[in-house]
Image (cartoon, grey):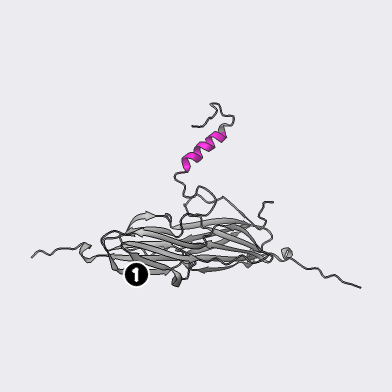
Amino acid sequence: MSENPALTKTTEISRDEAALLPPTDVIEDAGGITLYADLPGVPKDKLTLQVEADTLTIEGEVALELPEGMESSHAEVSLPRYRRAFTLSRELDSSRVSAELNQGVLKLRIPKAEHAQPRRIEIRVD
Amino acid sequence: MYYRSLFPRDLFAELDRLQRGMQQPFDPNPNIRGLTRGFPALNVGGTSQAVDIYAFAPGIDPATLEVHLVKGMLTIAGERKVDPVPDKATLHIDERFAGRFRRVVSLPDDVDPNAIEAKYRDGVLHVRILRKEEAQPRRITIQ
């Protein structure tokens, strides 16, 4: 098991289309994990979230209002696409993922499965 | 120049190293971390009518963004606050920028400092500065 039990990163990225890797924060608490990803320039309808087996893929297309005939003189965001894949732990319940996209920041909440939730065991005194 | 054996023990490892060395200049993401260069990332472009600057600054209240134009220098400054990690939670990956930022762009001489507009949408600040009237291309009518 790696140092990060809830989420491990995959380097496997499909090579067909080059994409930028969005900066991400991942926070784990007792109830699940929260993932924040910076996807500036991606509108809601151009964002794709996919869970396949245990892989979560975030993919977004940048849609900017570019004036006609614009010549780029300097570009730090050099590709119009973001993509990142994560391997989800089996502890997580991928069927109950909730997602919010707000001003270019994606917030994903993935709760832990019922069996992985912390439980307090009552002690009975007879 | 570092020493390398003339007879590498593992030919495939050598080939792999060679291939990676050639791939690197073309690969936009040579490592597995998200991009963490200057914040916000800037794209600059222009047409004959205007100069367009795009600052990729997601998750910021536009009211707290400061855009100044002083003596042909455009400054974009602000602060990005990230929610603090709650108690009993673990931060596994921490790549997103947090804190104060400032970026300065020197503009060409032919821009009009009074014709500037800034828009913030989907986490991207778009600053558009029109070029001066006399610098715009014109068609001269022949009488």
Q: Which residue is mark 1?
A: B117
The answer to whether residue B74 is magenta is no
Q: Amino acid at mark 1?
A: Glu
Q: Residue furthest front?
A: B71
**Residue B2 location (% of width, % of height):** 51, 32
| Residue B45, picture quadrant | bottom left
**Depicted B130 relative to depicted A81: above or below:** below
Q: How many marks?
A: 1
**Depicted A3 relative to depicted B125: above or below:** above
In the rendered structure, the answer to whether residue A95 lies left or right of residue B23 reads: right
**Residue B32 location (% of width, % of height):** 55, 50
Depth check: give the residue in front, B129 or B47: B129
Q: Which quarter of the image is occupied by the C terminus of chain B? A: bottom left
Q: Chain of mark 1?
A: B
Range covered by the magenta-colored residues = B12-24
Report the residue at 43% width, 55% height from top.
A79
